[in-house]
Amino acid sequence: MAINCDTLDLRAFLLVLELGNFHRAAEMLNLSQPALSRRIRKLEQTFGGEFFERTTRRVTPTAMGREIAPRIRRLLEDFDGTLFSYGDLGQSGSSLISIACIPTAAFYFLPEVIRRFSLRHPRIRFRVMDLPANQCIDAVAAGEVEFGISLIGTSNSDLDFLPLAEDPFVLAARRDHRLMRRKAVRWQDLGGEEIISVHRSSANRLLLDAALGRVNVRLDWKYEVTHLSTSLGLVEAGLGIAILPRMATPIDEHPILMTRPVIEPTVSRTIGIIRRRNGSLSPAAERFHEMLLNEWSKALQAKDK
């Protein structure tokens, strides 16, 4: 395939996609509409397919246009980031780091690392996509982000998974609950309890059900929720007890809730960094990636104290 496009062609494509209108995009780019159309046609010829379906009223992306958009967006972000951050990590300009992260890690761990990084590199901006585990993987694979923080569970040969930590499932209940008088709780001890869980389609629930199924343990769920934070709200209201990853529980001592390890067996999820195999990070993202690796173990150690 002959490469016959420049960055303005790519930016023009994304602007038309965003606005859904050639005329408005041409005005914003300070181009005539025929000139913009020629750039889009040139780009389509380079990639071998049409990016837009045009009618007299609107412009909509084709399947190819929707598929290629995240890759073009990432390509331009990498290009801009390299220009601005090369040599001095953005001190002479503004660079962008795009990452995907499961919500529990995004809430519990990521803000502190971003804060420390921003103190050293204040000109660098962040885009954090807090997504369910499978969508994190998809965002990395599609090139929408530079890397992701998610659960192990991808067989995509184009991605690498670097394990960072084990995050065990724990029991969360009100402080006055009878099970909170124990140092640890067995799965068999949960019989007859009103148990709150995330929805059966979530990665956390699938992992938990599979692990318990291997040892012939079955839990009767009373309530199912979409978000882990919602399960804690139901526990606090006295509706039952919740089984959830330790990372999803309050970091500091909570006035109402307590947690206990659940044993026989201990079930945990593996959290790590997902990257495109053989892919390179922008200089800013590479530095943040290094800090992330260094700070992760410190945060988990603090959680254990």
Image (spheres, helix red, strand yellow):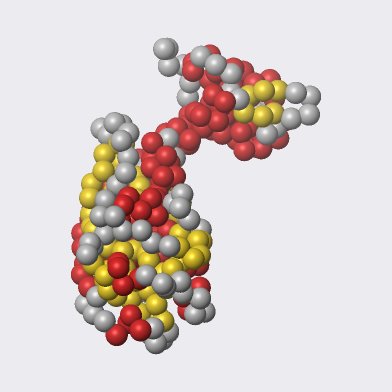
| Residue 194, x across and y down, in percent | 46, 71
- Whether 204 is drawn above or below 111: the answer is above
- Whether 177 is drawn above or below 135: the answer is below
Residue plotted at (53% across, 20% down): 43
Residue plotted at (26% across, 43% down): 161
Foreground residue, 39 or 229?
229
| Residue 200, x across and y down, in percent | 45, 53
Foreground residue, 8 or 112?
112
Foreground residue, 228 or 92?
228
Residue plotted at (27% across, 34% down): 277
- The answer to whether any part of residue 90 appears in the image is no
| Residue 303, x across and y down, in percent | 26, 72
Q: Where the C terminus falls, by quadrant?
A: bottom left
Which quadrant of the figure has residue 260? bottom left
| Residue 9, x across and y down, in percent | 53, 26
Q: Where the N terminus falls, by quadrant?
A: top left
- The answer to whether any part of residue 32 appears in the image is yes
Which quadrant of the figure has residue 75? top left
> In this rendering, would 47 be left or right of 216?
right
Residue plotted at (22% across, 64% down): 264
- Whether 260 is drawn above or below 2: the answer is below
